[in-house]
Image: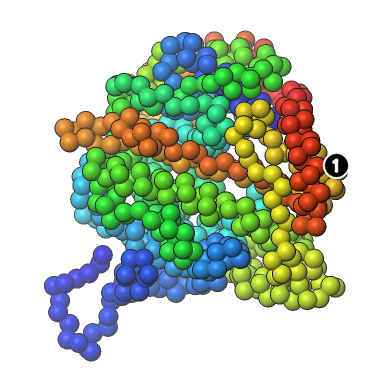
Amino acid sequence: MGRDCSKKEVRGTAKKNNHEIRDPIYAFVHMDSSEREVLNSAPVQRLRHIHQLALTSLVYPGGTHRRFEHSLGVMELATRIYNAVLENGGTDSLDIDRRYDEIYYLRVLRMAALVHDIGHAPFSHASEDLFPGNCNHEAMTLRLIESDEMEKLWAMLKIQSEDVAKLALGRDHPKKKTFSNTEAILSEIITGAFGADRMDYLLRDSHHTGVAYGRFDHYRLIETLRVLPKTYEDRSKEPALGVEIGGLQSAEALLLARYFMFSQLYFHPVRRIYDIHLKEYLQAWLLGGRFPVDVTGHLNLTDNEVMAGIWRASRDPDLPGHGVAKRIMMRDHYRVLYTRNPDDVLKYREAGLAIYTAASAVFGEENLRHDRPKIPASQAAFPVLEPDGRIVSSLLKSDALRHIPEVAVDTVYIRPELLVAGRAWLNENRENIIESGSELEDTI
Amino acid sequence: MKKIQRDGLLVELIDELTNYGSWCGETHIQKATYFLEAMMGIPLGFPYVLYKHGPFSFDLSDELASMRADALLEWEIKPEPYGNALKTTDVSAGLKARVPRTLARYRPAISFVAEKFGTRGVKDLEKISTALYVTNEAPGRGCEARARRITELKPHITLDEAKEAVSFVDEMFREAEPVIREIGGGET
């Protein structure tokens, strides 16, 4: 974008305006000099020091990559998706019918993609709960997008911070604004089911961790993306990102990749317990147990400071969080006592909670941990364009999509020294606990 | 409201929508749930944004997926012109049995909304729920002003369609009054 091929510059006499950054997934990420100013801003540069996958490298040693390269990748993919969607037509609902708008929205989209993660606290999602009050990483992202430093950059690029924020945050915009069709679709190009964020983290995390399940044919998928009305829903005209029929298999592959990566990597039980231990350390280490939410405080805190703190605390019993720091450094994490079982779910949906509560009464709450995260929907339903022009639901066309399970996690952990006793106790009491757990009080 | 109670009410809503003739796609559930919260005052706790074609809760969408993961709901693929429907299961009947008091309290509101929405098409529901969103955005505004606001926010809706949707919502509010009183809407 922004290339002007009409002017041939003499080598060595003109300042280079277009830049390429090497990338292990896409070979090159492209940007121009103005955009590089945003890349060089403090909030984006800080992402060089925020791990994409928190302490995952304790389980998958290759998983040490950072949010910085992910953000570059999302910008590159968002551009490719945007161009493909425009080239494939069907964008009447986007109101992008004038040259000016097309360029403006491309710029906004690219910058939104680049900054979509700048509000993350150290170790990303692992420590999300430690923002004070109603703050979260989306609210911090908004605060940074609207900061003095970034506002100057948006003015230089001639784009509005409000537009950048809407596209960067999409559904999670803290102010819950209204979305036009254009804004909704463009934000979905970054954050949706076929968005650049999802595509990049699957491909990149797979590449770095060696968990090959995350790969899929993103080239084919992007080439076939279209904005399509969901006419199969009672002739609704609501536009959504969908695919031409030729891209259905690559869409299936993406959704299967997501399922496998969620179950094999993101929600791997050992990886999850390190998130919990990390949060425990941070609660002991941070002032008041909460992250700072002012811009300067946020920018000054990265994984580096936290890791140095863990390293020191693990060796000094007088420092806050010594016990859990040692646990992290020595890889002495709590062990799995119970994991979700479909049969148990049929008897009692919150079987893990029942077991955690009963086990806490026997072994002490401090020796147990319970993990029941809320997991976003896979969004397997989307419009598919048939060769004859009809638009049908993906679930009608694909047995595979109809049967991809939603990921669910319900795990109870126990202190390593109590694992043998805990398992023996659970074997004896499991059925009774789950049965009795189903008798919940229906108070209103 | 506890998760089990909230999910019990969602299962009841899906059953009631089906009973009143709805094919029960996610749009029906989304818009009907919005009315349960924004008109009837049931504190389900799903945040809504005014999205492409009306109010939409991504949290509700995630919750419906979680309910599918736990075998409380399942897809039913309908022939054209209908899309993906959600239907309840034997497991969900068990869930309802565990929250009898919650269901007894809020059932009149669920039946009221389900009856109003059961036979309406997706496009109608999009307009009506947008009208409720605009009505709640600045209470007290007249029909014309709200209709204009709708066309400003959602240009694909004509002014006449917007006026019709606002009138429908006003009438529905009037009819809902005794039901809201009966369930003590908004109180937890």
Instruction: Point out residue A390 in the picture as x, y percentages from the top left corner.
Output: 21, 30
Q: Give the secondary structure at mark 1.
A: helix
Left or right side of B102 for B59? left
Looking at the picture, how far across and down is residue A15, in whole percent?
27, 83
Question: Quadrant of the rendered structure where residue B167 is?
Answer: top left
Q: Residues within 10 Å of mark 1 (few under 14, many from 20)?
A: few
Q: Residue at x 29, y 42 (%)?
A: A248
Three-letter amino acid code of the residue under disc 1? Ala
**Residue identified by numbered label 1:** A361
Residue for point 59% across, 23% down: B91
Colouring: rainbow
Number of numbered discs present?
1
Relative to A96, say whether A118 is above or below: below
For the residue pair A114 and A297, the one nearer the viewer reads as: A114
Residue shown at 43% from the left, 54% from the top: A213
Residue at the bottom extreme, as displayed: A12
The quarter of the displayed image where residue B161 is located: top left
Q: Chain of mark 1?
A: A
Q: Nearer the viewer, residue A289 or B69?
A: B69
Residue A269 rendering spot, x and y as whole percentages:
62, 52
Quadrant in the picture for the C terminus of chain A? top right
Q: Quadrant of the N terminus of chain A?
A: bottom left
Q: Nearer the viewer, residue B171 or B126?
A: B126
Kindly tell me whether residue B184 is visible in this rendering. Answer: no
Residue A43 spot, x, y in % from top left:
52, 68
Q: Is there any visible trace of residue A1 in the rendered image?
A: yes
Determine the residue positioned at 37% across, 70% down: A23
Q: Nearer the viewer, residue A149 or A107?
A: A107
